[in-house]
Image (spheres, rainbow, N blue to C red):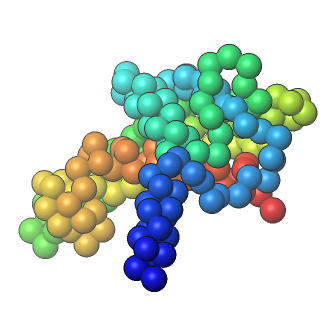
Amino acid sequence: MVKKFIYLGLVAAVLCGCSYSVYSNAYPHLKKIAVRPFENQSSQFDLGDTVLNGLTQQFSRDGRLKLVTQQPDCTLEGTILDFSESVYSYDSGNNVQDYMLRLSCSVVFTDLVNNQVIYENKNLTLNEAYAADGADSSTAKSKSKEEATNELVERLFSTIIQNSLETW
């Protein structure tokens, strides 16, 4: 009986350790993706690299599509239209408490096998708050600007995946 539990535990550990994915894929013929560098029209010069690196990491973690540079089944391309920061809230002493980051992109997810656009959004806009001084606030929860930027990239990935591979 004990051996049975050890065996089941080992099997579970192996499965958890592998890059196995239980996510659905509405397009099972798509196996490989090329994520193209996003054109950056924002004033933050390194944002294109941040978005590209973040998206490739997310695809790698997700595991539904293998990242390739040649002979992909599908592509993800886009343009960063705007990246801005504005004051979001003030504390009782009229000091800035939170800022809001806003990322606007144009994205296209294309099925190259069937030569069709699966998802396109010409003005995908995401917002994320962060604390001005890194302390807890009512909305930003000790998030730095860098952490808020990374969260925007994660949400960009989630939005693209939900509207392409996870369509019903």
106 to 128, vertically: above or below:
above
Determine the residue positioned at 44% across, 52% down.
Answer: 17
Residue extending furthest toward the top: 70
- Asked whether residue 97 is in view, the answer is no
- The residue at 25%/72% (across/down) is 138
For the residue pair 75 and 18, the one nearer the viewer reads as 18
Where does the image place residue 39, in percent across and percent down from the top left?
55, 22
Q: With respect to residue 79, does 126 lie above or below?
A: below
Residue 120: % across, % down: 73, 41
Task: Name the residue furthest left.
Answer: 93
Q: Quadrant of residue 107?
A: top right
Name the quarter where the N terminus is drawn: bottom left
**Which residue is rendered at x = 49% and y = 70% of the image?**
8
Q: Is residue 116 left or right of residue 91?
A: right
Seen at 52% across and 39% down, the residue is 60
Q: Quadrant of the C terminus?
A: bottom right
Report how many numbered discs are placed on residues in the image: 0
- Residue 3 in the figure: left or right of residue 167: left
Whether residue 85 is visible to the viewer of this picture, yes or no, is: yes
List x then y, in percent, for residue 101. Answer: 37, 48
Q: For this rendering, which residue is in front, 36 or 64?
A: 64
Residue 77 in picture, x, y percent from top left: 65, 29
Q: Farthest residue to the right: give it.
A: 114
